[in-house]
Amino acid sequence: MISPYIHGVKTDQVMSGDQATTVEEHEKEWNEILSNIQGAVDILAFQDGQVNYGELYDYLRVNKALADKYGMRCWSNVESFDRDMPIRFLPIKWEKLLYKLDAARRAGMEDIITFEYSHFMSPNSAYSQAGNLYNRYREHFKV
């Protein structure tokens, strides 16, 4: 399994003046990378937090198509912290997490992992918001 990030508008490099990678550039670059590692990786699970919400589905769709092309399973690494806050980092709002989960579902992701559960979603976290996020997740998915 690999879990790379998308070089989107929320990466530190872009926030420092670098250019974000467009969906088309992302597809071209990762097509080349995956062609070189085909057979060595079984699961592709891109981190989802470095792009704007409005672009997320497009990147996920490309990731799924590339994984299929190279015989990999495709998951989404749904970040459970919020990159849109001035304080780095707080647990994500439930509505944002649900949006990202739905985008992954629509794009055909086989499974979901999250970074970083222990800090941002666990009921045992020092952040009280993390326990609330966990409870909302359980209520919504009836688990």
Image (cartoon, rainbow, N blue to C red):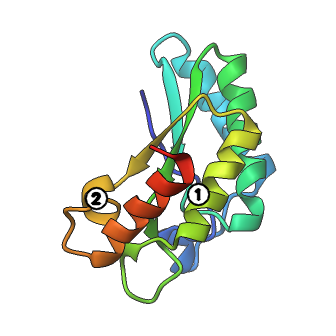
CA–CA distance in space, label 2 to label 1: 28 Å
Q: Say if 86 sits above or below 115 in the image.
A: below
Asked whether 70 or 130 is in front, the reply is 130
Label 1 element class? loop
The residue under label 2 is which amino acid type? Answer: Ser
Circle 2 crowding by C-alpha within 10 Å: few under 14, some 14–19, many from 20: many
Tell whether 37 sits left or right of 130.
Answer: right
- The residue positioned farthest toward the bottom in the image shown: 86
Asked if the residue under mark 1 is in contact with the one under mark 2, i.e. CB atoms within 8 Å, the reply is no
Which one is earlier in the sequence, the residue at label 2 or at label 1? 1
Residue farthest top in this picture:
39
Relative image position of residue 140 (x, y in whole percent): 56, 54
Residue beneath label 1, please? 7
Of 84 and 21, nearer the camera is: 84
Q: Amino acid at mark 1?
A: His
Q: Nearer the viewer, mark 2 or mark 1?
A: 2
Residue lying at 78% horizontally and 50% vertically, measured from the top left: 58
Q: Give residue 22's quadrant in the image.
A: bottom right
Q: Residue at the location (64% across, 36% down)?
A: 30
> In what quadrant of the picture does the C terminus appear?
top left
Q: Badge 1 local density, few (<14 within 10 Å), some, or many (20+)? A: many
